[in-house]
Image: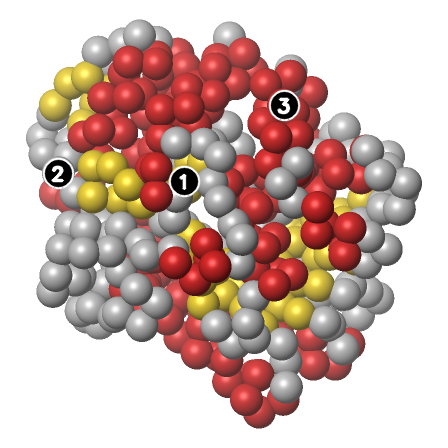
């Protein structure tokens, strides 16, 4: 079964759309979404598509990706819709085609896989910076209304405290470690966005998601939340390779989608917003425990090898203060237990 035809998934989308009446402001506009087959942006596209299914005036959706076949397979249910189009975009080697016309850009393309960050640090850093540079140049030349850049909570680095990160609370990042290509690439790209605003008047906003999970994660995704969700859906043991004491701001992907759309429509230009649900700030160990419970499987501890340890996020506490996001009127609907339960149930239904 295709995800867009899954009853639970559509019910979840409908639930978050019910608290987003301002999406009518996008009706008649064209929204370009890069990283369209990824965890966050594929969910965002399907939320906009579901909105179109129930409204007469449509939002034109441009799904940008580097693999045409992958995009067509992912959005098979949408290909024939007049308001949906797949466009070519590679964050490293090329910009957008000149004939692409859009009013808004949501930029989510980039390497976020821990394994690939370690094996492809150059592509990780260059893809973040140059991919965004190409889009900002396009925005300058084509009078795009607003660019939203999906950054990461990893920009904060290692904290010198044990409290949630505020927007301007930056910690240490080791610039001589290849693993830092991700965090520093995100930092540099955020500065590029605000620099285009200062020099060229390009309207951009930034979101910094915490640890996002959901059924839109691909089976090859090696982030622990995704690997464990798939394991739970298959009834396999959850294997934890650290003590699991690290604190993370987890967030169900559809709550992240509404956060992105809130910031796109209401965010202050050249400002960043943390994406974190207060009800989902938990330890990695608690994440594993919940997934083992909802998957009715066992939780086991194993030692990580040297290569695996190098790919670990070095942040002990990466919880986020999302006060600025809440001030826009956003609220998360899925606490950790409910979001993880729905994720496992949907994956089980899709792949059993």
* Image side of residue 302 versus residue 277, left or right: left
Label 3 sits on a secondary structure element that is: helix
Dot 2 corresponds to which residue? 245
In the image shown, does 121 or 214 lie closer to the viewer? Answer: 214
In the image shown, does 235 or 73 lie closer to the viewer? Answer: 235
In the image shown, does 170 or 301 lie closer to the viewer? Answer: 170
Dot 1 corresponds to which residue? 251
Image position, residue 50 (x, y; %): 73, 34
Distance between the alpha carbons at the discs numbered 2 and 3: 33 Å
Q: How is the image coloured?
A: secondary structure
Give the numbered dot on residue 11. Answer: 3
Distance between the alpha carbons at the discs numbered 1 and 3: 18 Å
* Whether residue 48 can be seen here: yes
Distance between the alpha carbons at the discs numbered 2 and 1: 18 Å
* Image side of residue 110 versus residue 291, left or right: right
Mark 2 or mark 1: which comes first in sequence? 2
Please identify the quadrant where the N terminus is shown.
top right
Label 1 sits on a secondary structure element that is: strand
């Amino acid at each position: 079964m295709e995800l867009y035809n899954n009853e639970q998934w559509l019910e979840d989308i409908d639930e978050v759309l019910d608290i987003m009446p301002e999406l009518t402001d996008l009706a008649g506009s064209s929204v370009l979404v890069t990283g369209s087959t990824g965890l966050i942006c594929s969910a965002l596209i399907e939320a906009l598509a579901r909105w179109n299914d129930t409204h007469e005036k449509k939002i034109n959706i441009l799904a940008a990706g580097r693999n045409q076949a992958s995009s067509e397979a992912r959005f098979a249910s949408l290909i024939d819709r007049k308001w949906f189009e797949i466009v070519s975009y590679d964050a490293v080697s090329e910009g957008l085609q000149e004939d692409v016309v859009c009013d808004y850009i949501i930029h989510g393309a980039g390497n976020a896989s821990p394994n690939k960050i370690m094996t492809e640090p150059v592509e990780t850093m260059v893809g973040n910076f140059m991919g965004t540079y190409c889009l900002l140049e396009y925005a300058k030349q084509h009078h795009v209304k607003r660019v939203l850049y999906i950054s990461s909570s990893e920009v904060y680095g290692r904290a010198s405290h044990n409290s949630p990160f505020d927007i301007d609370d930056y910690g240490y990042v080791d610039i001589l470690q290849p693993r830092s290509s991700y965090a520093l690439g995100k930092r540099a790209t955020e500065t590029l966005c605000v620099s285009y605003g200062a020099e060229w008047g390009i309207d951009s906003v930034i979101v910094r998601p915490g640890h996002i999970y959901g059924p839109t994660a691909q089976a090859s995704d090696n982030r622990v939340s995704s690997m464990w969700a798939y394991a739970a859906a298959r009834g396999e043991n959850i294997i934890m390779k650290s003590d699991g004491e690290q604190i993370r701001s987890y967030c169900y992907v559809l709550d992240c989608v509404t956060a992105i759309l809130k910031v796109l429509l209401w965010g202050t230009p050249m400002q960043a917003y943390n994406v974190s649900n207060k009800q989902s700030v938990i330890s990695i160990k608690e994440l594993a425990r919940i997934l083992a419970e909802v998957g009715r499987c066992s939780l086991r501890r194993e030692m990580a090898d040297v290569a695996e340890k190098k790919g670990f996020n070095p942040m002990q506490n990466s919880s986020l203060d999302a006060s600025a996001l809440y001030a826009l009127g956003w609220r998360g609907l899925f606490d950790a237990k409910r979001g993880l339960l729905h994720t496992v149930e949907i994956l089980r239904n899709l792949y059993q």
